[in-house]
């Protein structure tokens, strides 16, 4: 048997820990000695309910290395991450660096690896919002253009890369100069399928909150351009209060720590009080993954600015109001399952009324077959 493929996986933010679970599961099924994975956590997310809970619930092995960089200013934290990842890679113990999504941890991994001439495998490659004011848009473009393997979750992502000049096929061994682009499917879809039954068995959150299936809206807000902009934060919260009142629809908001902090700082006292103390608005700490997919699968409606939550609402065939001006997951909007409402109260109200009025949804299987992780791992094992 050849030497094992030695993967360094870089994670740091909540959604990356969740995504990494799918490939870690696929690695665990490989024969002993075929592949090893070192898990490096940058420490970008550090609260137990933003990090450890996902290791526990999704059966991810403990991180081998934690850089404890924390979150903060982009330059300072990304620099600490690059330095820490570089030091690990300089030991010469890894063949490939595996990266997920579009966070600062992704960017740091890409820069550290590419400068040491180590191949980068990017999972969730090719997504574009075409809005470079989003830190994530910069991170994903830069990471894609350092990568040797680009695993696209959707055909839209594949087309985006072709448009940027990535080759449709290569005849040489993949490298940063001759990258291999492939439609893999979405590891988050793998996870939703894999964990849905466990969530049904283990999560009692809907009942514990006194809610009825299809009798509440699930809301998440964490994008910096919503939470850190007083006018947008206020418009969103006012819209939520109106939805609850106008439609008698209880709301569940597991609040990201960024939103919690910024709402406290930016919202007028009366509005903050109305949000925090309404018996029909359930403000929760960040939820674990099983509770989250239980909430998604039982909600009447999802309202979110999260990329992952948008998609999971599609997987569970729930309508979604997107609190952004654009989305990378354009298929959802094209199929009528999601509406872009930005932070505009009239668009949010119209989208909610449209869906609560029973608009038909179309949720075809656009995100693969639930085996994206195996496909990605096999590609890495076969093509080195
Ligand atoms: C990051 C990602 C974003 C992703 C999101 C997932 C970047 C640029 N952004 O945004 O793409 O959608 O994670 O959730 O990488 N905080 C805590 N405890 C934690 C983590 C964060 O209190 O465990 C608070 C801190 O006040 C911190 C703030 O949240 O300053 C923002 O954290 P940060 O990681 O910088 O960005 P996110 O908004 O979480
Ligand atoms: N998520 C979770 N608990 C929460 C909010 C989100 O487990 O309170 C999960 C969600 O189900 C999805 C992922 O986190 O799998 C999405 O991450 P997030 O919204 O933080 O970031 P994004 O996807 O926008 O980058």
Image (cartoon, rainbow, N blue to C red):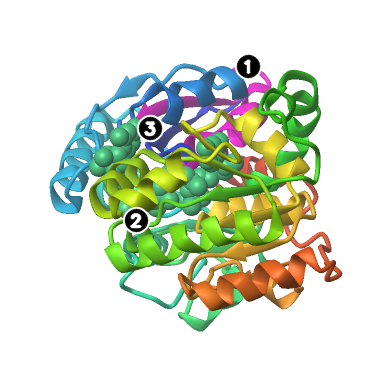
To which residue does mark 1 refer?
32
Q: Which mark is residue 94?
A: 3
Foreground residue, 271 or 157? 271
Q: Quadrant of residue 29?
A: top right
Residue located 57% across and 77% down the image: 347
Q: Position of residue 383 (x, y in %)?
A: 59, 49
Crowding near pointer 3: few (<14 within 10 Å), some, many (20+)? some
Cβ–Cβ under 8 Å for marks 1 and 2: no
> Which is more foreground, mark 1 or mark 2?
2
Residue located 48% across and 33% down the image: 286
Foreground residue, 340 or 264? 264
Magenta part of the protein: which range? 15-42
Crowding near pointer 1: few (<14 within 10 Å), some, many (20+)? few
Q: Is 58 on the left-hand or right-hand side of 257?
A: right
- Which element type, helix, strand or loop, lies under badge 1? loop
To which residue does mark 2 refer?
227
Q: Position of residue 318 (x, y in %)?
A: 76, 55
Q: Position of residue 382 (x, y in %)?
A: 63, 44
Q: Quadrant of residue 297?
A: top right
Disc 2 residue lies near ligand 1 with CB under 8 A: yes
- Which element type, helix, strand or loop, lies under badge 2? helix
Residue located 66% across and 72% down the image: 351
Q: CA distance from mark 3 to mark 1?
A: 17 Å
Q: Is residue 335 above or below residue 48?
A: below
Q: Is 272 on the left-hand or right-hand side of 189?
A: left
């Amino acid at each position: 048997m050849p030497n094992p493929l030695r993967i360094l996986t870089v994670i740091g933010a909540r959604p990356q820990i969740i995504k990494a679970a799918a490939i870690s599961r696929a690695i665990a099924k490989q024969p002993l000695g075929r592949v090893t994975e070192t898990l490096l956590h940058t420490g970008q997310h550090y609260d137990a309910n933003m990090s450890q809970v996902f290791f526990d619930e999704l059966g991810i092995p403990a991180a081998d290395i934690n850089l404890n960089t924390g979150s903060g200013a982009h330059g300072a934290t990304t620099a600490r991450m690059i330095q820490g990842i570089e030091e690990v890679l300089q030991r010469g113990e890894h063949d490939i660096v595996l990266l997920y999504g579009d966070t600062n941890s992704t960017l740091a991994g890409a820069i550290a690896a590419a400068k040491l001439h180590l191949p980068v495998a990017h999972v969730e490659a090719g997504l574009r919002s075409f809005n470079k004011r989003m830190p994530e848009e910069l991170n994903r473009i830069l990471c894609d253009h350092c990568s040797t393997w680009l695993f696209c979750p959707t055909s839209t992502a594949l087309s985006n890369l072709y448009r940027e000049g990535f080759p449709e096929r290569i005849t040489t061994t993949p490298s940063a100069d001759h990258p291999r682009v492939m439609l893999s499917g979405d590891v988050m879809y793998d996870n939703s399928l894999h964990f849905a039954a466990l969530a049904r068995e283990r999560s009692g959150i809907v009942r514990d909150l006194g809610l009825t299936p299809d009798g509440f809206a699930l809301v998440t807000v964490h994008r910096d351009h919503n939470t850190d902009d007083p006018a947008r934060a206020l418009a969103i919260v006012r819209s939520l209060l109106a939805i609850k009142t106008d439609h008698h629809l209880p709301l569940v908001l597991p609040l990201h720590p960024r939103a919690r902090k910024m709402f406290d700082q930016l919202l007028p006292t009366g509005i903050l009080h109305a949000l925090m103390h309404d018996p029909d608005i359930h403000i929760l700490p960040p939820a674990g993954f099983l509770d989250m997919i239980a909430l998604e699968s039982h909600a009447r409606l999802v309202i979110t600015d999260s990329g992952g939550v948008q998609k999971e609402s599609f997987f569970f065939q729930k309508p979604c109001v997107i609190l952004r001006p654009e989305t990378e997951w354009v298929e959802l909007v094209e199929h009528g399952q999601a509406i872009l409402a930005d932070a505009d109260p009239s668009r949010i109200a119209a989208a909610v009324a449209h869906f609560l009025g029973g608009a038909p949804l179309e949720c075809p299987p656009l995100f693969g077959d639930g085996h994206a992780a195996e496909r990605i791992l096999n590609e890495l094992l076969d093509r080195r």
